[in-house]
Image: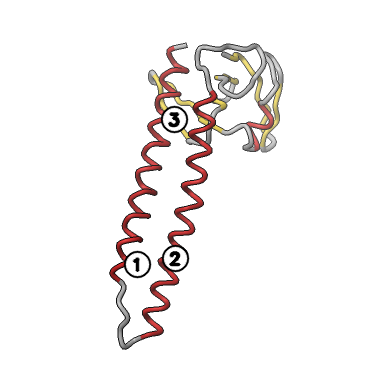
Amino acid sequence: METKEELYKLCKEYVNKRLQTVEDIISSNQKALQSETKSSAGDKHETGRAMLQLEMEKAGQQLAGITQMKEVLARIDVKKTSKVARLGSLISTDKANYFLIISAGKLTAFGKDYFAISVVSPIGKLLLGKQKNDVIIFNNNKSIIKKII
């Protein structure tokens, strides 16, 4: 259970870091948009504004993704266990360890590597609903589920 709590904490930190980065980008772009002044090179000015606007839209999409991640994290009770892989499950296979939560990549807890993956990711979809000793095949690699917490 300690491992799940530690991984959950690492996922929250990951989301908070991404949020801070995106907020910094938005703030920087807003300042740049405000300081853009019309120069004699009108086309260059318009191109600069358009590029900044695109960056703002991209940051807005990232912000929406981060908000979704926060909502998923809020629904997780790390103390709950299940014999069936579901959102919030810690799954050990003979090949790798997975935490079905959000796509946060490779995390290390207590000297062991885990992959924080979303339930909508290809591997997440395969793991969802599986039980101990079930076999999954991903990228032509067979894995046997050893444990689900």
In the displayed structure, 4 sits above or below 138; it is above
Which residue is identified by label 3?
11
- Bin the neighbour count of mark 3 within 10 Å (Cα to Cα): few under 14, some 14-19, many 20 and up: many
Residue 59, image quadrant: bottom left
Q: Is mark 2 on a helix, strand or loop?
A: helix
Q: Which of 47 and 84 is in front in this view?
A: 47
Q: Residue 33 carries which label?
A: 1
Q: Distance between the residues labelled 2 and 3?
A: 30 Å
Identity of the amino acid at label 2? Gln
Q: Residue 41, how many percent across, how many down?
A: 34, 86
Q: Is mark 1 on a helix, strand or loop?
A: helix
Q: Earlier in the sequence, mark 3 or mark 1?
A: 3
- In contact (CB < 8 Å): disc 2 and disc 3: no
Residue 7, image quadrant: top left
How many numbered marks does the figure carry?
A: 3
Q: Which of 115 and 71 is in front in this view?
A: 71
In the displayed structure, 134 sits above or below 10; it is above
The residue shown at (45%, 26%) is: 113
Which residue is identified by label 2?
53
Q: Residue 38, how many percent across, how many down?
A: 32, 81
Dot in front, 2 or 3: 2
- In contact (CB < 8 Å): disc 1 and disc 2: yes
The residue shown at (52%, 17%) is: 77
| 41 left or right, relative to 15 | left
Residue 95, image quadrant: top right
Q: Residue furthest bottom?
A: 40
Q: How far apart are marks 3 and 1 (CA)?
A: 33 Å
Q: Which of 122 and 43 is in front in this view?
A: 43
